[in-house]
Image (spheres, grey):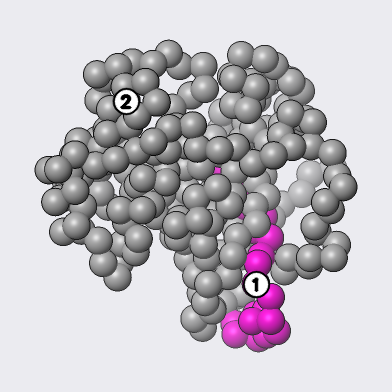
């Protein structure tokens, strides 16, 4: 059987590029996103009662990888990126059906827009459904987690160069909340592929909001060297 689903909404996220999105929800508490319901679902009645819940399950589409092929086995970052497990024993975004499931904190409900915190959503992500997080049913402290029992500790320490700190201070504000902390949190979890060698001195780049962030890594220390606004041609 084949099924056809229509998105109920769209995510507007601080993560505007795949390189930098956390590998699991809840790791970067400073991450922000807005879930905008779209017609005909953008009716206030559809959200009635949701204000009594603190968290939300979001069922979405991995739209950036939807057209790419999948493999029977994948290399989870938690295993160093070298050991393979079955795709259905992982949360890889390369799946037979490119569907993701994440929990996020509800910061505020504004009409038919939901302001969320701690998500792992790429900007422009189509949302298929949302459901309230119910603690007694969804929190199972005795559940087994195989190779992912405990949350990962940030493997790196991140800081700004003096010049980059001046730059980021100019951009932080209402439309880029917690920008400085977001960048530090994001880079401390090492967004590079787990199997990639340490390229000391190499300059990496990623995007948050409408900004380009350039950084380098030496050992376990990441230094942000430049933050600037993207040009319209990008």
160 to the left or right of 85: left
Q: Which residues are magenta?
A: 43-62
Residue at image coords 85%, 65%: 136
As for residue 141 lying within the magenta part, the answer is no
Residue at image coords 42%, 43%: 186
Q: CA distance from mark 1 to mark 2?
A: 37 Å
Picture coordinates of residue 59 (x, y %)? 67, 55
As for residue 55 lying within the magenta part, the answer is yes
Q: Please tell me the numbered disc located at residue 158.
A: none
Image quarter hosting the C terminus: top left
Query: Is residue 217 or residue 116 the one in the foreground?
Result: 217
**Crowdedness of circle 1 by 10 Å Cα count: few (<14), some, many (20+)?**
some
Classify mark 2: helix, strand or loop.
strand
Q: Please tell me the numbered disc located at residue 217.
A: 2
Q: Which residue is mark 1?
A: 54
91 to the left or right of 137: left
User: Would you place residue 216 above or below residue 29 in this image?
Assistant: above
Query: Is residue 58 or residue 223 the one in the foreground?
Result: 223
Picture coordinates of residue 176 (x, y %)? 31, 62
**Crowdedness of circle 2 by 10 Å Cα count: few (<14), some, many (20+)?**
many
> Depth-wise, is mark 1 or mark 2 nearer the camera?
2
Residue at image coords 49%, 81%: 110
């Amino acid at each position: 059987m084949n099924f056809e689903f229509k998105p109920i909404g769209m995510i507007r996220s601080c993560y505007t590029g795949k390189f930098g999105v956390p590998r699991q929800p809840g790791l970067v508490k400073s991450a922000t996103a807005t879930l905008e319901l779209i017609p005909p679902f953008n009716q206030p009645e559809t959200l009635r009662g949701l204000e009594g819940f603190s968290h939300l399950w979001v069922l979405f589409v991995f739209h950036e990888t939807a057209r790419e092929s999948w493999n029977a086995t994948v290399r989870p970052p938690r295993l160093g990126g070298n050991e393979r497990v079955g795709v259905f024993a992982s949360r890889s975004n390369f799946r037979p059906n490119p569907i993701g499931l994440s929990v996020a904190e509800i910061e505020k409900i504004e009409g038919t827009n939901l302001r969320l915190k701690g998500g792992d959503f790429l900007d422009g992500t189509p949302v298929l459904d949302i459901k309230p997080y119910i603690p007694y049913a969804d929190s199972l402290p005795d559940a087994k987690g195989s190779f992912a029992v405990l949350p990962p500790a940030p493997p790196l320490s991140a800081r700004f160069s003096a010049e980059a700190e001046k730059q980021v201070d100019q951009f932080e504000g209402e439309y880029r909340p917690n920008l400085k902390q977001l960048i530090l949190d994001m880079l401390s979890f090492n967004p590079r592929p787990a199997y990639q060698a340490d390229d000391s001195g190499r300059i990496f780049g990623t995007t948050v909001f409408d900004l380009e962030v350039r950084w380098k890594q030496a050992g376990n220390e990441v230094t942000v060297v430049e933050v600037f606004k993207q040009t319209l041609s990008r």
